[in-house]
Structure formats: C-alpha cells, structure tokens
Amino acid sequence: MKLPPGVLYLAELLPTTLLPSVVAYEFLSRVLPRLDLGIPPLPQWSQVLVVLLAQPAMAIILHIYTEFKNSRDAASRGAVTPPVAYDRWPGGWGLMKAMSKTEYPGDFLIDWFEQYGNTFTAKVAFNSTIFTIEPEYVKAILATDFDHFYKGPDTTRAGQSLLGSGVFNADDDMWKFHRTMSRPFFHRERISDFETFDSHTRDALAHMKKRLAEGYPIDIQDCVSRFTLDSATEFLFGKSVDSMSAGLVYPESSPLASSPAFVNHPSNTYVRAFTYGQLLMTKRGVFSTKWPLLEMWKDRVKPHRETADTYIEPILDAALERKKAKERDLEDGKRDEGATFLSHLVEATDNKEVIKDSIFNILVAGRDTTAATLTFAVYMLAEHPDMAERLRKEILDTVGSSRMPTYDDLRNMKYLRAFINETLRLYPAVPFNARTSRTATTLPALKPGDKPFYVTPNTKVRYSVFLMHRRKDLWGPDALKFDPDRFLDERVKKYLTPNPFIFLPFNAGPRICLGQQFALNEASFFLVRLLQNFTGFTLAPDAQPESTKPPASWKTAKGTQATEKIMLARHLTMFAKGGLWVRMKEVVTE
C-alpha cells in the first residue's frame, strides 16, 4: 500500500535529519568514554543539549559550506547571484502567504520586481527560488540552455497524483516518448480538417441560441470548455465524449442551475474533478517541497484524478478493444482504416497507466488552453464593441454570413489573427511556469559590462509570461492597452521582430506546444462562426456570482487590475472565476 504524501515525506526526510543527533549520541555515550582522555563525563542534561543542537549545527555548517562552494563556483564563471528579496518572515513564509492569497495573477510579485529588477531570488519554504520576467533568461531556460533545465524531481513529485508520467510532468526519456507520439498528429493536413470543428461549433451555437431564447445569458467559458473538450476528444481519440449533451450551465439565480440531471451529468462530474485536481495541485506549488506536510494522511489530489479516470476509461477500453480487433483483422488480411492518436499510443505501449496519464495530459492541453483563449477573446469582444464590429466585418468580407472558413481563409484574416494574438498577450493561457536547474549554470549577461547570474544546482526558476507580456519597456507605453493593431503596424518591427521571446503564449524551445497551430485554428474557426451568428456582445454582471466580482479595492490597483470586470484565477491554466457571463444578439438572416 502506498504511503500518504506526508508520511512518505517524513519517512524519507527523518533518517538524514536525525543522523547528526545519532552520531552525537553515539560519540558521547560510546566513543568518548573509550578514548580515556581524562575528561569527566558530561552531565546528562549537557549530553541531551549536545544531541539536540547537533541537527541545527550541522545544518549551519552545511549551509556555510554550500554558500562558500557556490560563491567560488560563481566567481570562477565570472557570475554573480541575483538580488535577494527581503522577506521579514523566515523561510519565505511572507511570500508564501502572499502567493496563497493572491487575487490577481502576479500581484504578489509586482512590488518586488519594481524594487529588485526583473530577476531576483527569494525563499519559498526555505528553498531558494529565482523569479524572472526577463526574455533573455526565459530564452535560456527554454531554448539556448535547455539541457541545463528540466521539470525536476520536486515538480514531478508534486504533479504525480494528477498528471502522472504525462508529457506535462515528464522529463528525459518519458518526455521524449510522449513528444514522439504526439508530433505526427499535428501536421497541417490533420489540424486543418475543419469538419470536426464545424460539427461541434454548430452544436455549441445551437445551445447558445436556445439559452438566449429562454432569456438567460451565456457562460461563454462553460460553453467553449465543452466545445474544446468535444473537439479534442474526436480529433485525438476518434470519438467525442459529447460533453455538450449536458447542456449549458444556468445562472445561480435560476432554479434550473441545481438540476440533478445537469449537476450529476457524467461530463460535469469529470469537469469538476478535472478542475479541483488542478486547483489543489497549484496550492501544492505555493509550499514548494514542503507541500506533503499539508497532506499528511491523505493525498487530496488523487481522488479527483480517479474520478476523471472513470470518465475516460471507456475511451481507453474501446481503443484496447480496437487494437485486438485490428490484430484479428490483420490475421484475416483485412486493411487498417487509419489511426488516431489514442490508437497510435495503444500500439506503442501496453502500460495502461502511461496511456491514461497521456490521455489526461493531452486533454488538459486540448481543452483548457484553447478554452481560456476563447473565453478571454469574447471578454475583449464585449469590452471593445468597435473591435468586435471590425472583426465581424473582416469575417463577412472573407467568408460571408454562412460559409465555413477554410485554412486559407483563416490565414487571410489578418485582424482575426492579430485579435487572438493580443488576447494571448494580455491573457496567456499559461500565465506562470517553472523549470529547475539540473546542475550549476548561468543566465546570460544582458549587455556588455554586465555579469551573468549564477544559478545553483536544483534551483527552481519561475517565470511569468503574464507579467512579461505587460512590460512597457518591451511592448511600448501602451503595453497595458488591448490593441490588436500592435501586431499589424510598425510596432511589430519595433518591438517583436528584434526580440521574439517577449511573446511566448505557447512556450518555446524543444518543449514548445505541439498543438499551437491546432489551437490557433480551432480558436479562429470558432470565433468566425460565432461572429457569423451573433453581434452586440455585452457582459452580464447580473448573472456573475457576487463572490467572483472584482472588489472595490481593485479600482486603486496597479495596471489592468484596476479596469477588469471579472476576476482572473488560475490552476495549470488561467480562467475567469465564476465564469464569463455575456449576452449577445442573434443575427437573423432572411
């Protein structure tokens, strides 16, 4: 039986922690008397004190030695350590408290970045952690110095009970396995097969029209999450899970909101487990390596993963049965009619846990990231009606009011792509990420005369594209303004072309998102169909749960936080807390 996280953590930690005390006790009680040095025996209380002090004394000695060793190594590389942020609480507890209570992405870091620069070191549960929003350093971590950084054992351990050995939680050979498995299914011919998108978009639009006809607003976030889940499962597994069949969520004020048929629908059970598991895993990150102490007797994440597995088990079982049938057909000389990602995965391994982990991870990517992009895109349509009309005009001029867009149509709609890029800039689906140094390395000097920053072994480097995308020195004085034209006018050559690493909504380097073009095509396709059918997007604050409306204190906050109409939250990806409730007008064609 597997031990609970907290018990396992202590079982691994105690032997090395107690070793100094054990050695001290053995020396005082057995070794010292045998040496016959003429020293009178120490009083018992003195022996107890020495035994107790042995642990902190050894910790101090090791700390001093490690600091000395790292200092010499840094000097030999001509490097310096990043500025150390002051935290009045020992071990970084002040930062951890701020991280756990954050109301807006990165709000707990903004003051420190302003005080210490774009890169600094802080303690998180006594572990040194580097925080950065510097494009050159992110470039090094993700690309140019890729071999010196990985997810790391601490990160993979924290994600094990949710992500298992899937691509988001894997390193080295297992990561390469998942990467190799996925790549063939994201070439142009596959990602531009829009029939799948169109089928599920039509389904979503029909549900929206029905709900609006009932007089209710739409939670766009809920709707597009179902659309992306259904599209992703059909694209990757050959069969949709049809989560849209549950219907769309009703506002809390409606008596239909708590309908047992809706609440207990299998897809909703899956989505709740999917979401809660990610939220709990994010909380683990706040406490760094010490998170198991908060789950002493029970893994709080694992039950949610098990619930999610019960939903995707039928998909896996069907794939395994198809594999057996294929083997029988091949024996009978029958032709294989094509492969899906899942069938390809099943062919590559018989390890059911590896397959389930891969499915779960690919659904995180296929559902959450594109759903986040579409949610915040509609948020911007509601906030900028002039841009919504301009975008709708481009769509109608290109494909008319009803024709399904093609791959070339989407490429020709420059404003559509700019609108999505600007959404990804201000509201990136993955606002924060991290890597861990395998060995000692450096982050490059930024300009002549500067020294590189020294990174000690096994140090977590956390970077935020959310904050980096909003830096005025990188994007211009209007960086906090939503303006798709920045991707069309002279600002592209001024800011983005010379430094492409200032814009990283899909990460970069060897671990860049394989589904980038798939996600862009899917989001573009949905927006085209949406704007062919609807206009006049407005927020519906009457349907937004009160607890998820921005508090009055936000009005005096820094940056875009002061102007937000919704609360942003995050787990593995960013989302609108309480949903994004909107009203819109259906376009009636003659």
Image (cartoon, rainbow, N blue to C red):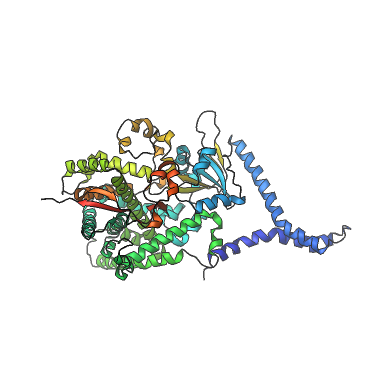
In the rendered image, residue 199, in percent from the top left (x then y), is placed at 21, 56
Question: Compared with residue 438, is residue 578 higher up or lower down, i.e. above or below?
Answer: below
Locate residue 456 relative to residue 322 in the image: left or right: right
Question: Compared with residue 443, is residue 211 higher up or lower down, i.e. above or below?
Answer: below
Report the number of discs. 0
Q: Which residue corresponds to the image point at 46% horizontal and 58% vertical from the top-left?
A: 281
Which residue is nearer to you in this view: 411 or 19? 411
- Residue at the limit of the structure toward the top, as seen here: 448
The answer to whether residue 179 shows anywhere in this view is yes
Which residue is nearer to you in this view: 345 or 269? 269
The answer to whether residue 509 shows anywhere in this view is no
Which residue is nearer to you in this view: 18 or 419? 419
Q: Which residue corresponds to the image point at 35% horizontal and 59% vertical from the top-left?
A: 345
Locate residue 456 relative to residue 56 in the image: left or right: left
In the rendered image, residue 101, in percent from the top left (x then y), is placed at 49, 53
In the rendered image, residue 243, in percent from the top left (x then y), is placed at 29, 62
Q: Which of the 4 image quarters holds residue 46?
A: bottom right
In the rendered image, residue 26, in percent from the top left (x then y), is placed at 76, 62
Which residue is nearer to you in this view: 66 or 526? 526
Q: Which of the 4 image quarters holds residue 115?
A: top right
Question: Compared with residue 360, is residue 413 higher up or lower down, i.e. above or below?
Answer: above
Locate residue 195 relative to residue 8 in the image: left or right: left
